[in-house]
């Protein structure tokens, strides 16, 4: 019904437009990439897709929202990034803590019992999907939980009553300020912080895995769990650390997401999770740098796709791209496993 | 949740019975000197059904409707101890996938003589045939998609203006009152949204500069924002519900869009402001084919007055002596009256004859629900 009248010529005839679509894509791509880390690391170590990772992220977004309400109140009157920075930093720590906690809980409840029993990978996958739904629906119950513990009056600023499954209404509204322009397109401080923070975290993690003792342990287990165990690597510990790091990164992603979007819902993880998983596969699942590349690429290609074909085709473009890449490189763009990363 | 409302309802019913045994029952005089209810109708003691969203993303809207229905039933039951009508609620979560199964349950339930609902357009299109074939009369308080009444389902009525009226009024408001020269139209691809956005597009004519579509649940609207900005539009119309509308309004403002943001009744909810944030929502115009409830009205929320009126039409039919679906349907078709939501009479398709469209404004960071402007 909607007839989109853009043509490639209209859009990319102007560099302003092109730069704008690209920057917008990079911002989302950076968030995809951070979430993708969780998928990639767990896959690298356990050869398992942790489908509940999107919920780890979602809990992080709520942690940010609630921290904001707690420190700032429900008044959503505008704040610049500079004004909100102290609250954001606290929110970041809380989100990282909450996401890491959920990730560890997930590992303990949904995976370790199965891994210890040497259950087939398929069972763990189903357990992951189940955990994903359970976590999302548990968040949907937050208003009732507040009632059960007798906190609904105190908490009415924190949960929106009767609409708990609905959008969480919150004051995480950061008004972006223009910094500089690239060919007429103005880059804002929020855009820059999201992209910058994401890349910084990725680099830090990459160095962690490559240079530290824990990193070596992770790589050892990823490469050959049995030999690693013989060499004295505590694989349970390594798996835990992997989930922990994935959770911490999801917390960072959640903070950046709230900085950019500002509202969340109990099913917020679903679409982002699928996209991040796609980014991980695109970059080569099990590869950290691949997750960054895949995430940024996916974000940008999506926006270009929207520009050329209309926004309703965004997801189609993303998945067609995924299929095309996998046809040419079945192991993804940087199809090198985590375990093979050089020390 | 269902369990708790059930027990609540039982309690309310008990309380009602207690109240009635104490008070003398008054005579009904809704339609002047027509037959008094006095147990005359075989429908006494039976049920009205509600089908719509009670939980899920749009659960609040369905809850508003139920409040209106329950108010009307309570008023009726308080007056007519010998002809009590109860409500059976069916929660579709607003989804056209859930509704057909519930519709089958409704038509197979002999104790149900009529339906207030369905709540949304998608579920109305998915269930209208079932109700029509079973001869069960229905009055929707809120489904506004134009095509529903084109299906020939003679049992289907609505007490709300359709999207045709709303879309034309919205387009007229943007080009007339706002003075917009270039309007960009966005929708989310659902039945209701496409219908409303489509009417707006047609009515805009040359003022339509471009259009785009987003998907429900998506949060990244940077591409749409960019398209709006490069089109040079001075107004944006969005067809859809308040979550995406709020996100779009917010991202447009943050992206530097200075023009007017307008959306329809799917966004006319205080949550729009919460999602968009005060700055993002400021100045937004949200239209709805429903005015504010009169002061002192015992149910709040969008569509509560329509649901109340729809219920009263059924009750008037019972008082008139209708004893089955067919007679009720005939009664509804020829009904004229003044509801709390405005004058009610149906055309031969089941659409309300006269409807007003209101524009609500976001001022000082709040949706002003009390002072809309009539735009048609």
Image: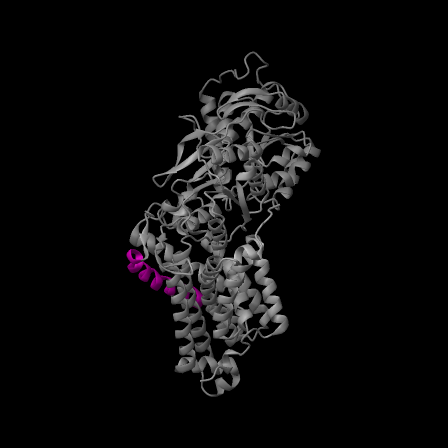
Which residue is pictured at 64% across the width and 29% down the height? B137
- Residue A60, above or below B165: below
Decide if residue B365 is on the left or right side of residue B141.
Answer: left
The quadrant of the picture occupied by the C terminus of chain A is bottom left
Residue B64 locus on image (x, y percent): 48, 36
* Residue B251 in magenta stretch: no
The residue stretch that appears in magenta = A82-105
Q: Nearer the viewer, residue B7 or A179?
A: A179
Asked where in the image residue A256 lies, by quadrant, the reply is: bottom left
Asked where in the image residue B109 lies, by quadrant, the reply is: top right
Q: Is residue A40 at all visible to an observer of this figure?
A: yes
Residue B276 locus on image (x, y percent): 41, 47
User: Which secondary structure type mostly characterizes the magenta part of the structure?
Assistant: helix
Q: Is residue B10 at all visible to an observer of this figure?
A: no
Q: Nearer the viewer, residue A133 or B353?
A: B353
Residue B319 locus on image (x, y percent): 58, 19
Residue farthest to the right, as pictured: B133
The quadrant of the picture occupied by the N terminus of chain A is top right
Decide if residue A77 is on the left or right side of residue A329.
Answer: left
- Residue B160, above or below B264: above
Residue B153 locus on image (x, y percent): 68, 32
């Amino acid at each position: 019904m909607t007839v989109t009248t853009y043509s490639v010529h209209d859009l990319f005839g102007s560099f302003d437009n092109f730069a704008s679509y690209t920057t917008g894509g990079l911002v989302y791509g950076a968030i995809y990439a951070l979430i993708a880390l969780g998928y990639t690391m767990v896959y690298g170590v356990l050869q398992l897709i942790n489908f509940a990772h999107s919920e780890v992220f979602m809990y992080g977004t709520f942690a940010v929202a609630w921290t904001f309400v707690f420190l700032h109140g429900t008044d959503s009157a505008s704040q610049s990034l500079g004004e909100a920075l102290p609250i954001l930093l606290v929110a970041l720590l809380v989100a990282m803590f909450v996401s890491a906690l959920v990730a560890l809980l997930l590992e303990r409840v949904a995976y370790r019992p199965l891994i210890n029993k040497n259950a087939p990978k398929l069972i763990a996958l189903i357990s992951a999907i189940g955990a994903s739904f359970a976590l999302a629906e548990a968040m949907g119950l937050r208003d009732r939980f507040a009632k059960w513990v007798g906190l609904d009056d105190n908490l009415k600023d924190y949960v929106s009553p009767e609409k708990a499954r609905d959008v969480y209404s919150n004051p995480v509204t950061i008004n972006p300020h223009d910094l500089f322009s690239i060919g007429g397109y103005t880059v804002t401080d929020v855009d820059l912080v999201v992209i910058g923070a994401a890349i910084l975290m990725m680099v830090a993690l990459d160095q962690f895995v490559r240079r530290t003792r824990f990193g070596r342990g992770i790589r050892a287990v990823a490469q050959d769990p049995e030999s690693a165990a013989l060499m004295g690597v505590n694989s349970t510990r390594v798996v835990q650390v992997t989930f922990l790091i994935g959770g911490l990164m999801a917390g960072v992603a959640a903070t950046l997401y709230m900085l950019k979007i500002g509202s969340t819902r109990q099913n917020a993880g679903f679409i982002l999770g699928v996209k991040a998983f796609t980014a991980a596969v695109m970059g080569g699942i099990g590869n950290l740098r691949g997750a960054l590349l895949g995430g940024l690429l996916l974000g940008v290609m999506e926006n270009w796709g929207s520009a050329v074909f209309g926004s309703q085709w965004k997801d189609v473009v993303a998945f067609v791209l995924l299929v095309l890449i996998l046809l040419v490189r079945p192991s993804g763009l940087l199809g090198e496993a985590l375990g093979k990363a050089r020390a | 949740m269902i369990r708790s409302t059930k027990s609540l309802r039982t309690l309310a019913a008990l309380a009602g019975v207690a109240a009635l045994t104490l008070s003398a029952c008054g005579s009904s005089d809704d339609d002047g000197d027509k037959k008094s209810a006095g147990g005359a109708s075989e429908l006494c003691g039976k049920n009205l059904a509600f089908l719509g969203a009670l939980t899920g993303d749009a659960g609040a809207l369905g809850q508003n409707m139920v409040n209106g229905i329950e108010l009307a039933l309570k008023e009726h039951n308080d007056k007519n101890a010998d002809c009590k009508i109860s409500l059976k609620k069916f929660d579709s979560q607003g989804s056209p996938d859930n509704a057909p199964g519930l519709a089958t349950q409704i038509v197979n339930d002999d104790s149900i003589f009529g339906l207030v609902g369905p709540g949304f357009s998608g579920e109305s299109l998915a269930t209208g045939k079932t109700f029509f074939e079973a001869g069960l009369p229905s009055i929707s308080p809120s489904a506004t998609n134009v095509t529903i009444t084109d299906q020939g389902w003679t049992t289907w009525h609505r007490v709300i203006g359709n999207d045709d009226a709303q879309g034309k009024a919205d387009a007229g408001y943007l080009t007339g009152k706002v003075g917009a020269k270039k309007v960009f139209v966005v929708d989310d691809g659902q039945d209701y949204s496409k219908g409303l956005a489509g009417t707006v597009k047609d009515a805009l004519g040359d003022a339509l500069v471009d259009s785009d579509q987003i998907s429900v649940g998506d949060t990244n609207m940077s591409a749409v924002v960019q398209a709006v900005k490069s089109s040079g539009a001075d107004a944006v119309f969005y067809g859809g519900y308040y979550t995406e509308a709020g996100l779009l309004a917010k991202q447009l403002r943050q992206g530097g869009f200075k023009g007017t943001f307008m959306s329809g009744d799917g966004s006319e909810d205080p949550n729009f402001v919460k999602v968009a944030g005060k700055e993002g929502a400021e100045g937004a115009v949200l239209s709805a084919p429903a005015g504010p409830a009169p002061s002192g009205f015992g149910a709040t929320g969008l569509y509560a007055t329509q649901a109340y009126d729809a219920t009263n039409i059924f009750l008037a039919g019972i008082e008139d002596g209708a004893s089955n679906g067919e007679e009720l349907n005939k009664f509804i078709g020829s009904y004229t009256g003044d509801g709390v939501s405005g004058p009610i009479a149906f055309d031969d398709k089941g659409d309300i004859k006269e409807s007003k469209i209101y524009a609500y404004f976001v001022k000082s960071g709040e949706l002003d629900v009390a002072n809309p402007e009539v735009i048609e």
